[in-house]
Amino acid sequence: MAAPIQVQSGADMAAPLELNTRQGQGARAALVKRLCEIVSWPETRMPTQERQLAADILISLLRTASSDHRRRCALGLVRVQDAPKALLRYLARDEFQVAQPLLEAGVGFDDSDLIATVRAGVAAHWLAIARRRGVNEAVTDALVQTGDIGVIETLLRNTTARFSAQGIDMIVARSRAAVEISPLLVGRSEVRASQALVMFWWVGFDVRVQIVRRFAVDRNTLIGDLGDVFALAAAEGWADEDTRKALQVVERRQRNRAAALRSPHGSLEGAIAAAENGMDRALMHEIGHLAGIRPTTAAQIFSDPGGEAIGVLCKAVGLKRPMLLALWRALRRPPGDAATTDNPLGRAVYVYDTLATAKAQTIVRYWNWSFTADAVGADGLAFDDVGSETPQARRNAMLLFNRNG
């Protein structure tokens, strides 16, 4: 007769299952560790397809592995140039303590890997990528597009990062609301004069001084080499408007001599003296016209809260210091100590005293070029939506007049 079947209780059945689970965990840890080593091997040590298979198996195991295992795997891949892409991207999107070493220093990433990680990641991951050595224009563009000021500041501090012209434009736009990044931005070699001189309008005194010192040029080479073109355009009666506008940026004279001949005040100095008795819109336009700038540019300069723009204009048109002070009074600007830079008048005088006439003219030409005809309708457009083919003058006007820039 067969022996009766012994039925195990629930407690009796649980013990061997727990033992098997503990044994399985040991094998699992060994398998994860060994696969992490294998996928870190260079291509010369094993066939590419076999290594990719190992990476695919490893990804399925890492999904339930501890963060410590995943971090060790990430650390092993940091110096692997040809690491499996799927595994790299998986670890790059992991929690920050796992992804950090790869994102900051992993050599196996290409631009598409990093850009995909930016688009799928969060601020901590963006910061890690921003700290990478040699991060290039495509990746910095993606990081700047996140709009995260901490990420942008980290990029600007990264001396090995490279920026596109469009990327710098985007950062200039961001600097309007986040002026703390302006000193870092002005120091970047990728910044062009046209970009810095539009940023002038919303930065503080110290950064304004940086801008005028670095980006104001005297135009002597252009004036000399384009002398025959000036003569040709004059002989044609300045018939081509685009040529006339372009040459106005370069020409030596700032004041409008023809306007002075027609003005009831006889000169710029005469108009400023009259304005001390009472400034109205018509007289302000007349002063701007005599100074060789258009009404939009004049209004921007005369309303500048910091006052430095007025100092730039006065130097550009060759006004003596007493006339600068007269214009200041005519504009009903607050009085101050011209000998210190702790007040708007003192800052205007400081810029006036330290800036050469030819360089001041260049700054005024940039402003006049950017914020006049190209400013029409700019206040109704979103800067982030414009393409790189948009003329720089138009882009500058949008930055200045679009308050959502």
Image: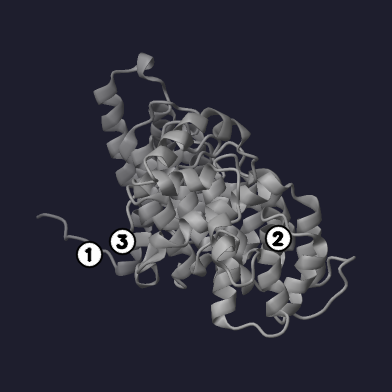
Callout 1: few (<14), some (14-19), or many (20+) C-alpha neighbours within 10 Å? few
| Image location of residue 195, percent across then percent down | 53, 51
Left/right placement of residue 223 relative to residue 212 reads left
Left/right placement of residue 90 relative to residue 306 reads left
Residue that carries the numbered disc 3 in the rendered image: 13
User: Circle 2 — which element?
Assistant: helix
User: Does residue 245 sit above or below 310 in this rendering?
Assistant: above
Q: Quadrant of the N terminus?
A: bottom left
User: Circle 3 — which element?
Assistant: helix
Q: Earlier in the sequence, mark 1 or mark 3?
A: 1
**Image marks 3 and 2: residues in contact by CB distance under 8 Å:** no
The CA distance from mark 2 to mark 1 is 104 Å
User: Does residue 190 sit above or below 266 in this rendering?
Assistant: above
Residues 218 and 155: in front is: 218
Looking at the rendered image, the disc whose residue lies closer to the viewer, 3 or 2, is 2
Q: Quadrant of the C terminus?
A: bottom left
Residue at x 42% of width, y 23% of height: 41
| Image location of residue 267, percent across then percent down | 65, 64
Identify which amino acid the numbered label 2 is placed on. Answer: Cys
